[in-house]
Image: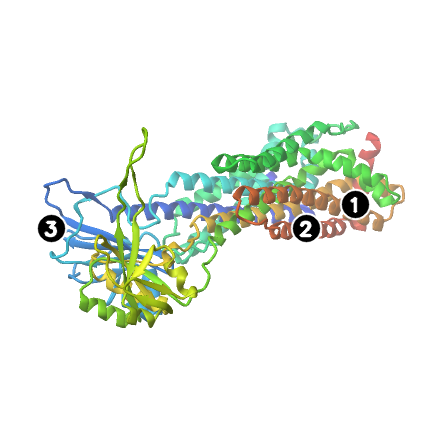
């Protein structure tokens, strides 16, 4: 009975009812898709952790026979770290995840991402000659850079392992707590879903209230009416949610990257079991019903009231003023305390602006009403009449306009990194490890450069007076080179046994050293070597190729290792901002249209006393445009204050005003769209229908 009644009440209505149900269905589908992506992400992170744990083993106790021996060195390519692991199987039958059983000494195995880069760069292929791809069970995520090399008994490896799962991880992607991902995913789904569904369910008040009022007149109880309303929402949301969940269930296993984020995944990583997809769809339907239950259907059938709403008190401005003060105070602090105060102030400002919105609407309405325009007078009076209700649909926009400029500034800083060093024709690469004379000559020829030896002379103890302890003098670093070989790559002003002077344009390369000479110092010991070249990329590739194939006896360090690497969390933050922005602006448009439909009821009186439809449309458009522009630009102003404060807290960054300008332009565009939507909603036929249906009720309540 309930379901038949709900089906009749929900779908058997005019065009407005059909549009309402389509909007609810689309919102349910969008929220279900977000919920499914969040669920797949949780499953993906769990799979990454499982694979990472499977390729980590328990260390062997001292004196215990090891099943495996391993060592690790760190390589890099254009600033990205490569984990290079050397393995030796000590016990027959023990396997390494991802490595086939036919692996022999000297074999290389690399991750799919590294294999792809090897195929694009012949010089990189020299580092890992004949490399094969690791199996999926040995890979954490599709974009990690990992290389394995099988070595023989002549190579000294530092760690002995037992064939028992350990707690350490290999690579960068492991160790992310699944609980943290679950909390983040659920928070995003609830915030995004509740906001979007609440806005989508707004238009339900017009057509459904009339039908529920009829049930009330026929004697249906309040509980029955609420069940009918809930069942109607479920009938609208369930088919769309099920279709979205089914679509993701089919498509997800074939995806090669996380949507919006762009992070690469292994085939099937984003797949999810059927029960999980069904659960996500059911949860969204329950959320839609729960949000719809707050629409106030229990008041159906109650008598209208002429109670005048109370004007908002000015005390509502206090939280916003306090939050802006907190942001300003954070600028005066340094370190972690300043950052915490700043973040707290920004979130407090997003909430404080929402609390202050009724005051803003009331003041704006009063200012418009004092103008000489009839439309301004009507729009201002209507905004001031119930300022709280006028501001309610715009809360998402206000909060968004505050947070987005600050978040965008953070992302810009996170992606900018340290400034690039000034361009130079001379590159310096640090090399550690012993080199035979023949190997040294061959590397110089292949890499197109020259080795310079750096000697370290430790400082002597300096006695001090009083109770102060003795201090050690700073060590002296002296570089030693051959004049003829060095002059080919570095312009020299003078070169002799008592000192070497390089040209000014090359001096920054040697600025960190105390002296240069052609003779090794007597008391010094070799600390490391520099490779000087004019072709840094080729030299680095050649030296790193030799280093990784030396089984860890030699290491290479270049300026690329110090290059800024974007945090892997930044794309996730950006995708969350994109989802929040899309959801907030969609909710904004739906809320404005809903407000237009509700305000049409009160415009009936103007229509009845002779107001033309054109006047009504201009009034609707003015109300929507003014409210959206005022709230959005007010939020942008507060957000810009936060962005300026962020630049001051960071200390080394200029203020980035582009996010504020983009949001301001988007607000003006949203105001125009809202004005057009509100004006289109007011048609001659809708006004006549409203007048015919509601004028008797309005007359009785006048």
Disc marking residue 689: 1
Residue 168 or residue 295, whichever sits in front: 168
Q: Is residue 173 left or right of residue 157?
A: right
Tag 3: Cα neighbours inside 10 Å, few (<14), some, or many (≥20)? few
Residue 71 or residue 53, whichever sits in front: 71
The image shows residue 452, relative to residue 658, as above or below, that is: below
How far from the left and from the top, in percent, is residue 318?
A: 67, 29
- Look at the image and tell me in which quarter the C terminus lies: top right
- Look at the image and tell me in which quarter the N terminus lies: top right
Badge 3 marks a residue whose secondary structure is loop
Residue 20 or residue 340, whichever sits in front: 340
Tag 2: Cα neighbours inside 10 Å, few (<14), some, or many (≥20)? many
The image shows residue 251, relative to residue 164, as above or below, that is: below
How far from the left and from the top, in percent, is residue 179?
A: 39, 38
Residue denoted by label 2? 670
Picture quadrant where residue 311 is located:
top right
Between circles 1 and 2, the one closer to the viewer is: 2
Residue denoted by label 3? 91
Which residue is at a point 35% across and 49% down the rendered structure image? 173
How far from the left and from the top, in percent, is residue 446?
A: 27, 72
Between circles 1 and 3, the one closer to the viewer is: 3
Disc 1/disc 2 C-alpha distance (Å): 29 Å
Instruction: Tell me which label, 1 or 3, sits earlier in the chain.
Output: 3
Residues marked 1 and 3 touching at CB (< 8 Å): no
Tag 1: Cα neighbours inside 10 Å, few (<14), some, or many (≥20)? few
Badge 1 marks a residue whose secondary structure is helix
Disc 1/disc 3 C-alpha distance (Å): 86 Å
**Residue 14 in view in this figure:** no
Disc 3/disc 2 C-alpha distance (Å): 68 Å
The image shows residue 220, relative to residue 192, as above or below, that is: above
Instruction: Tell me which label, 3 or 2, sits earlier in the chain.
Output: 3
The image shows residue 598, relative to residue 217, as above or below, that is: below
């Amino acid at each position: 009975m309930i379901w038949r009644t709900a089906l009749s009440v929900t779908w058997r209505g005019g065009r407005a009812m059909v549009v309402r149900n389509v909007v609810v269905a689309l919102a349910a589908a969008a929220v279900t898709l977000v919920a499914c992506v969040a669920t797949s992400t949780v499953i993906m992170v769990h799979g990454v952790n499982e694979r990472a744990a499977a390729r980590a083993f328990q260390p062997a106790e001292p004196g215990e026979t090891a099943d495996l021996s391993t060592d690790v060195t760190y390589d890099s390519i254009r600033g990205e770290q490569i984990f290079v692991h050397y393995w030796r199987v000590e016990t027959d039958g023990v396997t390494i995840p991802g490595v086939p059983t036919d692996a022999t000494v000297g074999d290389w195995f690399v991750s799919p991402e590294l294999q792809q880069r090897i195929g694009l760069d012949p010089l990189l292929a020299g580092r890992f000659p004949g490399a094969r791809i690791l199996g999926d069970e040995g890979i954490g995520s599709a974009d990690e850079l990992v290389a394995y090399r099988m070595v023989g008994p002549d190579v000294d490896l530092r760690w002995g392992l037992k064939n028992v799962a350990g707690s350490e991880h290999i690579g960068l992607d492991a160790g992310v707590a699944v609980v943290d991902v679950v909390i983040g995913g659920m928070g995003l789904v609830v915030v995004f879903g509740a906001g979007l569904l609440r806005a989508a369910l707004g238009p339900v008040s017009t057509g459904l209230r009339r039908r529920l009022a009829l049930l009330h007149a026929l004697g249906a109880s309040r509980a029955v009416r609420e069940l009918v309303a809930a069942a109607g929402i479920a009938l609208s949301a369930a088919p769309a949610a099920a279709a979205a969940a089914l679509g993701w269930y089919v498509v997800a296993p074939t995806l090669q990257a996380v949507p919006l984020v762009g992070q690469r995944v292994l085939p099937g990583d984003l797949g999810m079991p059927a029960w999980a997809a069904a659960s996500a769809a059911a949860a969204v339907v329950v959320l839609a019903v729960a949000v719809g239950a707050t629409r106030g259907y229990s008041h159906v059938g109650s008598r209208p009231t002429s109670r005048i709403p109370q004007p908002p008190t000015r005390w509502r401005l206090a939280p916003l003023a306090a939050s802006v003060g907190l942001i300003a105070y954070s600028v005066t602090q340094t370190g972690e305390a300043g950052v915490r105060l700043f973040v707290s102030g920004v979130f407090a400002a997003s909430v404080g602006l929402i609390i202050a919105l009724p005051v803003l609407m009331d003041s704006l309405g009063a200012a418009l009403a004092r103008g000489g325009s009839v439309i301004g007078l009507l729009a201002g009076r209507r905004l001031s009449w119930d300022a709280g209700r006028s501001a309610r649909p715009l809360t998402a926009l206000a909060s968004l306009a505050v947070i987005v400029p600050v978040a965008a500034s953070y992302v810009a800083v996170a992606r900018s990194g340290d400034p690039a060093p000034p361009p130079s024709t001379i590159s310096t690469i640090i090399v550690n490890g012993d080199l035979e004379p023949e190997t040294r000559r061959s590397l110089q020829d292949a890499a197109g450069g020259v080795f310079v030896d750096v000697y370290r002379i430790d400082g002597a103890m300096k006695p001090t007076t009083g109770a102060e302890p003795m201090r050690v003098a700073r060590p002296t670093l002296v570089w030693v080179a051959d004049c003829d070989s060095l002059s080919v790559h570095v312009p020299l002003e003078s070169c002799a046994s008592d000192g070497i002077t390089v040209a000014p344009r090359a001096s920054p390369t040697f600025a960190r050293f105390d002296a240069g000479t052609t003779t090794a110092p007597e008391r010094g010991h070799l600390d490391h070597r520099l490779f000087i070249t004019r072709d840094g990329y080729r030299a680095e590739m050649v030296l790193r190729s030799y280093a990784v194939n030396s089984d860890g006896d030699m290491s290479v360090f270049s300026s690329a290792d110090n290059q800024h690497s974007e945090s892997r969390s930044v794309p996730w933050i950006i995708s969350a901002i994109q989802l929040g922005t899309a959801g907030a602006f969609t909710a904004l448009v739906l809320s404005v249209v809903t407000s237009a439909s509700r305000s049409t009821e009160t415009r009936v009186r103007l229509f009845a006393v002779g107001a033309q439809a054109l006047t009504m449309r201009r009034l609707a458009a003015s109300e929507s445009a003014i409210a959206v522009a005022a709230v959005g630009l007010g939020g942008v102003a507060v957000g810009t204050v936060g962005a300026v404060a962020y630049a001051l807290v960071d200390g080394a960054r200029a203020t980035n005003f582009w996010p504020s300008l983009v949001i301001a332009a988007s607000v003006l565009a949203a105001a125009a769209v809202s004005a057009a939507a509100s004006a289109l909603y007011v048609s001659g036929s809708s006004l006549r229908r409203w007048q015919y249906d509601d004028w008797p009720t309005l007359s009785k309540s006048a």
